[in-house]
Image (cartoon, rainbow, N blue to C red):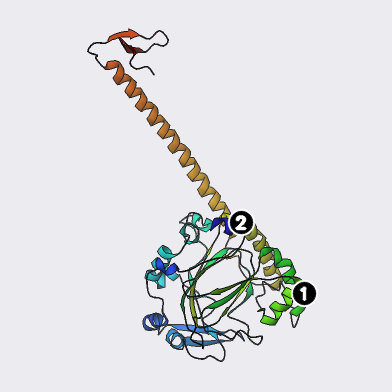
């Protein structure tokens, strides 16, 4: 995993359900949280309608003229662990590469925030959406954007396609090296000029014909991933990506900040700062500077503790050897004779054949 991740390349790990527990089906959420209110967002028009969790999940598997999803993430304004404690534990103990992906993973720099501070909300969150057609007239489930951190996204439940084949989600993930050329292309396809960055505005979904033009005219091609049930997709920080559910899909995702992504994260954080100034809204949700500061403090503390532990171990070993030497001096031999060592002030014992012990 690490040699690929360090190069900023997306990774897919399949069959992660071998470690997962819990129930993640539409029926489970409908039966246990069906009466909870939720706002459904039309993936095409971005309009919102009020509904219940049951109304959304009970329609899984049906035809949808316009696909919807319950907001950008669910629950939108609440802690996942507080609402779904059992599922939170199932995610924490089942997610792959746990040192990186768990919210408390040692290699997840965000985990080093002190307990007394307010940590960034990095998830996990559920991403639920109906399927949509892969045609130029549609705009996918999640429009093109890029994130300041890395992320893991796992497909928990997917419907079947109309032909009875396994469904899932279609991902297009672009390399960091292609961001400049991609931005130039997006400015040429915008119907009306927009304030801000064409990627950070999250207003464009690259249709099949756009992707073809991008490859033909600019030699820019994304990593194309078809995510099936229990596939975990790792998205590096700073990589533009978009998603289109081919069928109704329940996914769970969590952000994480790794050392390998720090340079890209700093660059994206600077871009988002300029985006907030241009658009006049948005917050620094991640607190990247604080993340790096607390991670450094934590690592320095552990390094100092390790140095102290090493010194204590060395002192214990020294004392052990001293006790062994003292025990040797106090030993009473049967047929040996004691002499004082001519090279040091230590008394030791010599046998008829030579030196018995000398330290």
Return the x and y of residue 330 as percentages of the image width and height. Answer: 27, 16
Residue visible at 24% across and 14% down in the picture: 333
Q: What residue is shown with label 2? A: 262
In front here: 244 or 147? 244
* Mark linked to residue 217: 1
Return the x and y of residue 143 as percentages of the image width and height. Answer: 62, 77
Residue 284, can we see it?
yes
Element assignment for label 1: helix
Residue at the extreme left of the image, as rendered: 334
Element assignment for label 2: helix
Q: Earlier in the sequence, mark 1 or mark 2?
A: 1
**Residue 66 position (above or below residue 357):** below
**Residue 184 position (above or below residue 266):** below
Residue 104, can we see it?
no
Q: Quadrant of residue 21?
A: bottom left
Count of marks overlaid on the render: 2
Residue visible at 40% across and 63% down in the picture: 93
Q: Nearer the viewer, mark 1 or mark 2?
A: 1
**Residue 295 position (above or below residue 59):** above
Q: Disc 1 to disc 2, how far (Cα)?
A: 32 Å
């Amino acid at each position: 995993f690490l040699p690929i991740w360090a190069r900023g390349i997306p990774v897919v790990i399949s069959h992660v359900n071998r470690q997962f527990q819990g129930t993640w089906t539409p029926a489970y959420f409908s039966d246990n949280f069906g009466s909870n209110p939720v706002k459904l967002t039309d993936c095409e028009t971005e309009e919102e309608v009020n509904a219940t969790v049951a109304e959304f999940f009970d329609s899984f598997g049906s035809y949808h003229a316009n696909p919807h999803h319950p907001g950008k993430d669910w629950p939108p304004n609440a802690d996942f662990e507080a609402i779904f404690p059992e599922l939170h534990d199932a995610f924490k103990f089942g997610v792959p590469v746990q040192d990186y992906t768990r919210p408390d993973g040692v290699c997840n720099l965000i985990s080093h925030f002190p307990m007394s501070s307010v940590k960034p909300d990095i998830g996990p969150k559920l991403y639920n959406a109906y399927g949509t057609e892969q045609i130029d007239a549609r705009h996918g489930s999640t429009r093109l954007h890029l994130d300041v951190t890395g992320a893991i996204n796992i497909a928990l439940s997917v419907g079947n396609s109309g032909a009875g084949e396994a469904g899932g989600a279609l991902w297009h993930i672009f390399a960091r090296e292609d961001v400049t050329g991609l931005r130039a292309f997006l400015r040429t396809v915008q119907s009306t000029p927009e304030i801000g960055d064409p990627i950070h505005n999250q207003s464009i979904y690259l249709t099949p014909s756009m992707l073809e033009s991008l490859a033909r005219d600019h030699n820019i091609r994304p990593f194309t991933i078809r995510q099936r049930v229990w596939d975990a997709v790792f998205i590096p920080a700073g990589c533009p990506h978009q998603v289109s559910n081919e069928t109704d899909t329940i996914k769970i995702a969590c952000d994480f900040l790794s050392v390998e992504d720090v340079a890209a994260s700093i660059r994206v954080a600077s871009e988002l700062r300029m985006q907030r100034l241009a658009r006049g809204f948005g917050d620094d949700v991640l607190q990247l500077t604080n993340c790096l500061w607390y991670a450094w403090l934590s690592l320095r503390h552990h390094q100092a503790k390790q140095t102290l532990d090493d010194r204590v171990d060395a002192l214990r070993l020294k004392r052990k050897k001293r006790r062994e030497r003292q025990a040797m001096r106090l030993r009473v031999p049967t047929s040996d004779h004691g002499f004082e060592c001519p090279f040091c002030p230590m008394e030791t014992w010599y046998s008829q054949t030579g030196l018995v012990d000398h330290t």
